[in-house]
Amino acid sequence: MSFNDGANIGSGKASRRGRTGVAVGGGGALVVIGLFVLSQFLGIDLTGLVGGGGTGGGSGSSASQELDQCQTGADANANLDCLVKGTAAALDAYWVGEYPTLNAGAYSSPAGGVQLFSDSTNTGCGSASSAVGPFYCPADQNIYLDTAFFAELRDRFGASGGQLAQMYVIAHEWGHHIQKLDGVISRASDGDTGPGSNTIRVELQADCYAGSWVGSASTVPDSNGVPFLKPVTQTQIKDALSAASAVGDDRIQGASGQVRPETWTHGSSDQRQRWFLSGLHGGATACDTFGVSVDAL
């Protein structure tokens, strides 16, 4: 899915942070990801358990650099940072109209939008390195992303790549912000893992919300009435599904030789694809992952 060249993406909430010198290491990426997921739900920074640590207050971060060079859809098609900013603008515009369908009150965008960083950063949820992967921090309502993850998604996890695969990652994290606004994250913060757990239901709902945005994205206009994005193609949808599959718990664990469903935090590859498609075809109101049985997840 690509942007219309003349689309105005100047409203997109995205900026790039300088390096902090904070590092989270040891234990392997899966351990770090698992600890950070629990950190988000419990409101406690657990990443220090695997080295490096942090204070959880976000102190020490370098000043953010606004992406003022990113103003048009043509910029988004040509530059990765601008793609992130454009995606943020398109997501914000979409959820302004879609959020009321969830009967969850007034919509507000993530406080700082998408915060791009390299190697490591401090957040309201604690310190994090690139090993954590993209994440949403409920404490400060920011999305954090090291864009090097997109290459890792392709090269390490075997996703096909493409712009929509990258946008899917951002849209998934934006879905967590929607869950923050409507109280899902606080209601589901029991820290349980495995099939049927609230942790997995939260993640699959975010996949569904990402799909709902993709299904309507080409109809959402910018401030001048120009649609942000061109109509999505089947090839692009396959790219997004490839990304969703690549980060399924079974696929990630299978690469290390041992699949343990009781430890899953995000759902299987099949589940992630199915819920993305549910949102794609049914919109945000089709994303009630908490209202179905374990077998239907």
Image (cartoon, grey):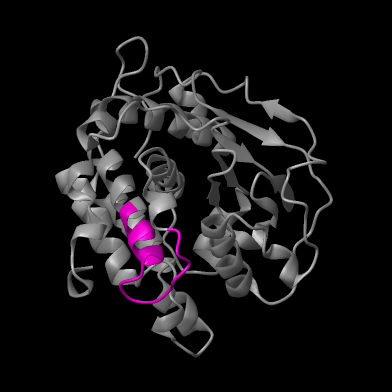
Name the residue rendered at 45%, 29% in the picture: 109
The outermost residue toward the bottom is 257
Q: Is residue 82 visible?
A: yes
Q: Is residue 118 visible?
A: no
Name the residue rendered at 44%, 50% in the picture: 186
- Magenta-colored stretch includes residue 278: no
Residue 74 pos. (x, y %): 46, 25
Q: Quadrant of residue 245?
A: bottom left
- Magenta-colored stretch includes residue 201: yes
Residue 270 pos. (x, y %): 28, 70
Asked if 20 appears above or below 198 in the picture, the reply is above
Residue 67 pos. (x, y %): 63, 25
Name the residue rendered at 44%, 66% in the picture: 247
Side of 238 relative to 72 (left or right): left
Side of 152 relative to 7 (left or right): right
Asked if 13 appears above or below 17 in the picture, the reply is above
Q: Quadrant of residue 175?
A: top left
Asked if 71 appears above or below 138 in the picture, the reply is above
Name the residue rendered at 61%, 61% in the picture: 132
Which range of residues does the magenta coloring cover?
A: 189-205
- Which is more toward the observer, 125 or 29? 125
Side of 178 relative to 295 (left or right): right
Q: Quadrant of the N terminus?
A: top left
